[in-house]
Image (tube, rainbow, N blue to C red):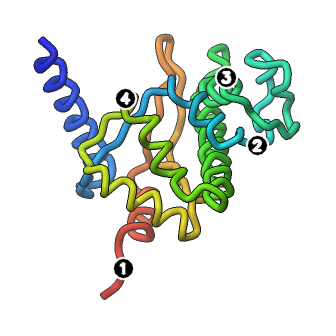
Amino acid sequence: MLMETEEKREQQFEYTKQAVSYLLMGLKIDSYMAADLEIIASLNDEVGGVTVTIPTLGMEEADPEFVFGQTVRLDGEQAERFVRYRDTGKDNSALSRMEQQKLYISGFFQAVKERSKTESSIVEKLFEMTQNYMETDMAKEQYLKLAMDALEGEGLTAASFKMAPGTGTATEAYDEYYVDQEALVPILLDLFYREA
């Protein structure tokens, strides 16, 4: 039964890679990595917390400290609330949540970078903590190298993330997002292709 579940998970990730490849006009997706949000609190606290400026109105529903415009150093439980929060009473609130997640990831990266100055093995330690909460088809050496290259380079900032241009629409049952394929082309060319 366990093998069947593992095979099913692997198949789901393959389907996801295919769907992303299709969205990106056939661009090959080499690998995947997914982690359960349950580990975020521990990772957050391991790097000494993450500082963010609250970007979304109404986030006090999730935590009284989440006042729009205020800068907060998130502890573990707050980190999870911050990345999960969306106002389901508002159309397309998942788009605001993505902005929160970009801010958190770039803040987390900065915290890791700072910690790495005094603890050289922090990246490996964080991945060890994540091991039981993570699914990937990459070898350990491969994802550690990617993380170390990011630490040594410019790293991740909110500007590092690209949103596929498109339009959000609310239906009776769901919020839906339709990608503008024509507007996506120049972004793909800029990110993945170079003139010879």
Q: Point out the tag, 1 or 2, that comes first from the N-terminus.
A: 2
The residue shown at (71%, 25%) is 78
The residue shown at (66%, 28%) is 76
Disc 2 crowd, CA 10 A, few/some/many (<14, 14-19, 20+)? some
**Label 3 near label 4: C-beta < 8 Å?**
no
**Label 3 near label 1: C-beta < 8 Å?**
no
Please give the residue where the numbered disc 1 appears in the rendered image: 194
Q: Which mark is residue 132?
A: 4
Per the image, label 1 sits on a secondary structure element best described as loop
Q: Point out the tag, 2 or 4, that comes first from the N-terminus.
A: 2
Is 34 located above or below residue 153 in the figure?
above
Drawn side of residue 21 relative to residue 173, left or right: left
Per the model, the C-alpha gap separating discs 1 and 2 is: 36 Å
Drawn side of residue 128 relative to residue 22, left or right: right
Per the image, label 3 sits on a secondary structure element best described as helix
The residue shown at (50%, 18%) is 171
Per the model, the C-alpha gap separating discs 4 and 3 is: 19 Å
The type of residue carrying mark 2 is Thr
Question: Which of these two is toward me, 48 or 51?
Answer: 48
Question: Which of these two is toward me, 47 or 99?
Answer: 47
Please give the residue where the numbered disc 3 appears in the rendered image: 77
The type of residue carrying mark 4 is Asn
Please give the residue where the numbered disc 2 appears in the rendered image: 51
